Amino acid sequence: MAYIATIGARTMTNGVTTVDCQKQVRSWRLLRSLMELLIPTCNCTFIEENHTKSEKCLQNYNMNNSATITGTILGYRRGKALFCIQANANSTNPILLLELAIPTSVLAKEMRGGTLRIVLESSTTGSCNNLFSTPLWTMYCNGRKVGYAVKRRPSHGDFEVLNLMRSVDVGTGVINGKELNQEDELMYLRANFQRVRGSSNSNCESFHLIDPEGSIGQELSIFFFRSR
């Protein structure tokens, strides 16, 4: 399915804005360009840290143990970014909703670099086998420790956003704040991701963006890793 650019030239009945030309997004590079248009440049910086956890996670993955899901990165222009995992675009009951450690504008800056790798590490121990039951994650963005990501229950506002986005299979866009009783606009990037589970004892799971041509690369990947 083609990625549809939704940048805000014409408003649909559900409040999600769309560009008049309805151009198809053909690559991750163009997806990043669209995000640059949606979100202004930010001059925030990070402190560099050595970090190879994503590579360690990859060593434990069984690529045959995978499935395709819907992943959405979204956030208000002046707020923190969220990562939402759903079984499909029509689902309004997220598998996981995480508030990431960094603002939406900072995340957009990282995306402009060409590669976005987020690693979420938990040191929680216990008998629970559900990796996503962890409430707090140490977050690394492109090899730099940036703070903590927090699992949260979807609020009424979150459900309202997901309901408005049910018509969006894949793409980037803006939801007018008035549709959500907010003064700020909400930006989003929705895509199909390959969900890869590690071996039964690896405590790893990852999500890799699938481009419109069906290729799976490392340009946008999110790793969940439970240390022991």
Image (tube, helix red, strand yellow):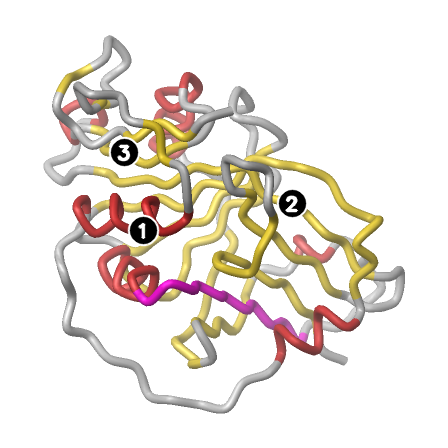
Residue for point 38% across, 89% down: 48
Left or right placement of residue 58 versus residue 108 in this view: right
Query: Is most of the magenta stretch helix, strand or loop?
Result: strand
Query: In the rendered image, which residue does mark 1 sit on?
Result: 32
Amino acid type of disc 2? Gln
Left or right placement of residue 174 versus residue 171 in this view: left
Picture disc at residue 111: none
Amino acid type of disc 3? Gly
Q: Nearer the viewer, residue 193 or 21?
A: 21
Query: In the rendered image, which residue does mark 2 sit on?
Result: 194
Picture disc at residue 173: 3
Residue 158 x/y as whole percent: 39, 34
Front disc: 3 or 1: 1
Residue 112 x/y as whole percent: 29, 61
In the picture shown, does residue 198 fall above or below 98? below
What range is drawn magenta here?
113-123
Labels 2 and 3 touching (C-beta < 8 A)? no
Residue 222 x/y as whole percent: 55, 59
Front disc: 1 or 2: 1
Left or right placement of residue 135 versus residue 80 in this view: right
Residue for point 50% across, 35% down: 212
C-alpha distance separating marks 3 and 1: 12 Å
Q: Would residue 117 be counted in the magenta stretch?
A: yes
Instruction: Answer with mark 3 or mark 1, whichever residue precedes in sequence.
Output: 1
